[in-house]
Amino acid sequence: MRVLYRAISAEERGTRGTRKPTPKYQRPLPATPKARKVQAEALNEDLALALAARVEEEITFDWLKSHSPVEIPDNNRACGELLLNELYPTGSRILVFTAFASQGQYMYVVGDGAYKLGRKPGVAPVKAPRLPAGGDSGVWYLTAPITGKWEPNPGKRDAMGNLMPGRRHAACCTSFPYLVLESDVLTADVWLKILVQLADPIVAVYTSGGKSVHALVKVSAATPEEFNAIKAEYVLRLSSVGADAAAITPVRLSRLPGCMRHGASGENGTYFKYDKPRLQELLYLNPAAVPGVPILTMPARKTRKAGQ
């Protein structure tokens, strides 16, 4: 034992009981919270209607606009860039789509403007005068800002098994700041009455150009794992009152306000064109939204101009 003890270096023995605590900045970061596996509940229509009935006044599009801290411009064409400029920091790169199942046709750089993108890697973006005015099935944006680079997509391989490049998957995203709440099972009037009661920081509300209304909620997640941990709570709380759990994903396309939707695809994939284009309408914009302040509690007041 004495030989063994002598073999232990004096340096090691000297640190026992006297070792200085590791500075906080050198300690390992806490593990990313793990998402709970939760099952979305089926719609409880009675519960959803009872919740909506707590709001006595009608929550119309005009009501929302009158309660929007940022004034919604009369020029609908300006609403897309307004939303992106208000919700993302300068320099953020946002993918914009006129074809849903694609890698994006435009990139909007906050503070710099729109760029038309090539369909394949290696094609340089070209400055565009502005974002698209509409699309066959509308216009979308990716709620997570991107690097703008093509990266191998772990979830997509070619016939030879090689990873295929993409610019809209999680590895291309720099953060996951927002979560989308939408409902395809409730009428817009019922869904809006539920949304305005939520104490979550809703930064924007806009229509799909179809039947649904989308709400954008600030979650400020740094990684997909952190986002999914947050998602679990929303699914547990809101799926039974109509929220679409499948729409709550870290990499999510949502409707870009101010753009026209010219038609839609049916369940069998058949496209049909509307008699007249429908507006994806911006209804509410509050980049400074904080938890604990439902839209319903915010009085109609003098709004501020964007950027003020």
Image: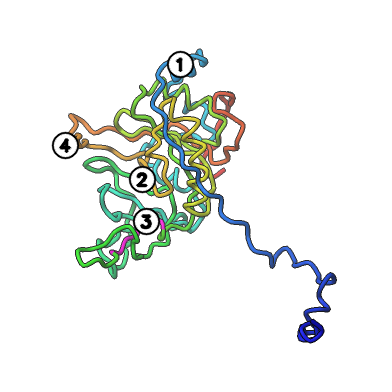
Whichever of labels 3 and 4 marks the residue nearer the N terminus, that label is: 3
The 10 Å Cα crowd at callout 4, few under 14, some 14 to 19, many 20 or more, is few
Q: Disc 3 and disc 4: Cα gap in Å?
A: 26 Å
**Of pointers 3 and 1, the one earlier in the residue sequence:** 1
Q: Amino acid at mark 4?
A: Asn
Q: Secondary structure at mark 4?
A: loop
Question: Between 277 and 17, which is closer to the camera in this rendering?
Answer: 17
Is residue 181 inside the magenta stretch?
A: no
Q: Compared to 127, does 269 lie above or below?
A: above
Mark 3–mark 2 Cα distance, whole angstroms, equals: 11 Å
- Kindly indicate whether the residue at mark 4 contacts the one at mark 3 (C-beta within 8 angstroms): no
Q: Position of residue 182 (x, y in %)?
A: 40, 33
Could you say which disc has been placed on residue 169 in the image?
3
In screen coordinates, is 307 left or right of 45? right
Question: Sequence order check: which comes first, mark 2 or mark 4?
Answer: 2
Which amino acid type is shown beneath numbered disc 2? Leu
* Spatial separation of the CA atoms under disc 4 and disc 1: 36 Å
Where are the magenta residues, as a range? 164-170
The disc label shown at residue 268, or none = 4
